Amino acid sequence: MTQKYKFFINNKLLFLVENPINVDEFMENPTEFIVKPFELDDLQNYIEVILGDKNGSNWILYGAEVEKNKLHFFEYFKVIRAAGGVVVNEQNEIMLIHRRGFWDLPKGKMEKDETLEETAVREVIEETGISGITLLSPIYYKGLDNKCTFHSYFEKEKWILKESYWYRMETNFDGQLIPQTEEDIEQVKWVNKMDLPQYYDNMYLSIIEVLKNY
């Protein structure tokens, strides 16, 4: 089976694959991608361009040993593990949070001695004030080897690569939603599933990916 990992780096897509023709987005819009063989001697230069302010393209790095290439790619980042949830209430609405100008899903960093599932539930409770959560199953990504989303951000003079593991959750909570303001969350709201695309223009690509694979 052909391996394929999808990353959200500097607000663009990056794929690590064996063969570019296995990337659906590339086959649909090849002009939007820069395609390069995965070569260790060139990797630092590639990453500098990908992370640079002038990067306007999606990228595909291809090579036979995708798992090994992924580990080499990780060496250029501080990797942080996090977990969160797509929470659905009894009205079949999905919970969104608004943080730092974007619509998002509740998630947070994994603490010492926690499981991913424990992290996901704790963060949802802390960031939204709800209770009565039932954790159902992990969210995986059609056509990808990802078991999580990968996205980058810059913090304290370092590029961070966050691995976020997502879970389907249900709740019978019908009380007041309480945004965790110390985490810069300004609003928590329930949204009808059919209305979610209205929020995509003001949502991170990685979060859209989660919702589409929910």
Image (spheres, helix red, strand yellow):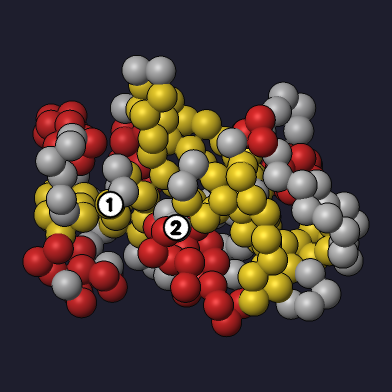
Nearest the camera: 80 or 5? 80
Question: Is residue 48 depicted above or below 14 in this figure?
Answer: above
Q: Give the image quarter of residue 169.
A: bottom right
**Is 21 left or right of 125, judged from the image as shown?**
left
Q: Residue furthest top?
A: 157
Q: Which residue is mark 2?
A: 203
Measured Cα–Cα span from mark 2 to mark 1: 13 Å
Q: Residue furthest bottom?
A: 194
Q: How many badges with numbers are in the image?
A: 2
Amino acid found under the numbered disc labelled 2: Met
Q: Dividing the image into 4 quarters, which one contains the N terminus? A: bottom left
Q: Residue 146's spot in the image, x, y percent? A: 48, 55
CB atoms of marks 2 and 1 within 8 Å: no
Ranked by sequence position, the earlier of labels 2 and 1 is: 1
Residue beneath the point at 20% across and 64% down? 20
Task: Report whether residue 68 is seen.
Answer: no
Mark 1 crowd level (few <14, some 14–19, many ≥20, 10 Å Cα): some
Q: Secondary structure at mark 2?
A: loop
Q: Secondary structure at mark 1?
A: strand
Question: Is residue 76 depicted above or below 129 in this figure?
Answer: above
**Is 169 left or right of 204, judged from the image as shown?**
right
Residue beneath the point at 76% across and 27% down? 113
Residue beneath the point at 87% across and 64% down? 174
Residue beneath the point at 31% across and 48% down? 11
**Is 159 left or right of 150, judged from the image as shown?**
left
Question: Is residue 107 depicted above or below 155 in this figure?
Answer: below
Q: Which residue is mark 1?
A: 12
Q: Residue 189's spot in the image, x, y percent? A: 67, 60
Q: Residue 136's spot in the image, x, y percent? A: 77, 64
Q: Residue 71's spot in the image, x, y percent? A: 38, 35
Task: Report whether residue 49 is seen.
Answer: yes
Between disc 2 and disc 1, the foreground one is 2
